[in-house]
Image: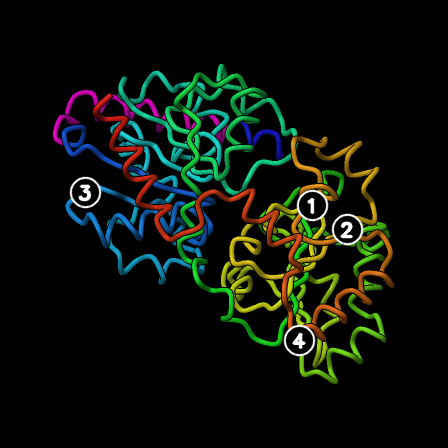
Amino acid sequence: MRKFHDVAYKVLTILKLLVAFSLVYIFGYRLRKKNLWLISEKVTEARDNGYHLFTYLRQKHPSLSAYYVIMRESPDLSKVAPLGNIIKANSFKHFCYYLSARHSISSQPGGACPEPKSIILRFRSLARADQDIVFLQHGIIKDELTHGFDYNKTHYSLFVCSSVQERNFVEKTYLYPKGIVKNLGLCRFDNLHNKKHLYKKQVLVMPTFRQWLISKNMPGEASDNENKQFRSSNFFKIYQELLEDRKLLEYLEQKGYKLVFYPHYALQPYIKCFSDMNSKTVIVADRWHYDVQQLLIESACLITDFSSVFFDFAYMEKPEIFYQFDEKEYRATHYKKGYFDYREDGFGPVFQSRDQLVDYLIKTIENGCRVEEKYVNRINQFFDKRDNHNCKRTYEAIKLLEEE
C-alpha cells in the first residue's frame, strides 16, 4: 500500500509539473518578465541562509521580485509572513513560479524547486532556459561529502563558500569551473556579527546526526521500534551519560548555568527518548520551540562533535569543545575526512573521554568563557571575512549572474 502511494504521488507530481509548464509556456510571459528570485531552505523552516537572504532583499531591495517558499504548517511562518511574498511549498503557484524564476536559490541542494526534488530535477529542462541555480549552503563544507555535489550533476551557477580553504576544496573535489564557487560567507553569519558578549549562563550541546540512526519518518516522530533501537545505540548512551553526569550538573547548578541539549534536525524524531533527562539544569530542546541560531547567540560555550555548526560559534569567537567518542566509526560509515583537521585546524580541544570533557568545560567557565589564544588565531586564519555584509556580497554575486 505504501509503495502504491509513493508511485501515485510521483505520478501526480509529474502531471502537476506538466500542467504548470503548459500554462507558464502559454500565459507566463508576465511572470517571466518579473525576473523572479525564488528562495527556500528546508520548507519546514525559516531559520537558515535562505531566510536571512530573503529578509535582506525585502528590507534593502523591496522592488525586487523575491519570493520565499515555506509550508503553511511551519512554526516559522509567523516570523517570515510579515515580509510578504510568501509561497506555499508544493502549491500549484510554487510549481509555476519555479518554472518561471530567473534565480532558483536555496540553502538545500537543487534550488527552490518543489518536492520531491529527485523527480522535479529530472525535468529541469522545463524551467526557463536562463535560470540560475544558486546554492547558499546549509553549513561550511569541511568533510568529503557525497559526489552529488559534482558540477556535472548540479550545474550550479553560484556555489557560496565562507573561506579560501573551503572554496579551493570544493572546486578541486567537485570539479567546478573557476568563478562559480565564491568566498562570500553564509548569509546567516550577518546575524552573528558582534554577538560575542550577548550570552546567558548556558552551555549548548549540539551533536550532528549519524547515517545509521536516521528515522524513516523525518521530520515527524520516530516509530516505537525505531525509538527502541535508538535507545540501545552507543550514541544515545554516551549522551545520556553526559546529560546525567553528576559532577557536571552539580557544578552548573552551583554556578547558575543551564545545559541545553539540541539534537540535529535528522535526530529530532527521537526527541522523546531524551525527555526523561529534562531537569532544572538540563533542557532538552526540540526544533518546534527552539531556534538554532538563537541558541548559538545566547550560549556561552558549545559542545559538539563533527557538526559544522561550530563554524557559526567560532564566527562569534566563543569557546567550543569537540566530543568525538566515535571518531573511527563516524569516519568509516558517515563522512570521510576532508581538508579540515580538528586537532590541527579546530577552534577548540578534541576529547573522547567524558571526564576530560567535563574538566575542560569547568575550566573554561572558571576562566570566564574566554577562547584560548591559539584558537583565536585559528579562527582569524580561517575566516578572511568576519562582518555583517554576507547577504550583501551574495546579492551582488547573484546580480552579476544577470549581467554575465
Tell me if 259 is positioned left or right of 38 in this view.
Answer: right
Q: Residue at x 82, y 55 (%)?
A: 231
Q: Residues within 10 Å of mark 1 (few under 14, many from 20)?
A: some
Q: Residue at x 40, y 52 (%)?
A: 387
Q: In the rendered image, which residue does mark 2 sit on?
A: 350
Q: What amino acid does circle 2 point to?
A: Val
**Between marks 1 and 3 in the image, the one whose residue lies nearer the viewer:** 1
| C-alpha distance separating marks 2 and 4 | 22 Å
Q: Residues within 10 Å of mark 4 (few under 14, many from 20)?
A: many
Q: In the rendered image, which residue does mark 3 sit on?
A: 64
Question: Residue 266: x and y, percent?
Answer: 63, 47
Which image quarter: residue 14?
Answer: top left
The kind of secondary structure the magenta stretch mainly shows is helix
Q: Observer-nearest residue: 117 or 372?
A: 372
Q: Residue at x 69, y 45 (%)?
A: 306
Q: In the rendered image, which residue does mark 4 sit on?
A: 258
Q: Residue at x 42, y 31 (%)?
A: 182
**Between marks 2 and 4 in the image, the one whose residue lies nearer the viewer:** 2
Q: What amino acid does circle 4 point to?
A: Lys
Q: In the rendered image, which residue does mark 1 sit on?
A: 306
Kindly identify which numbered label has been placed on residue 207. Answer: none
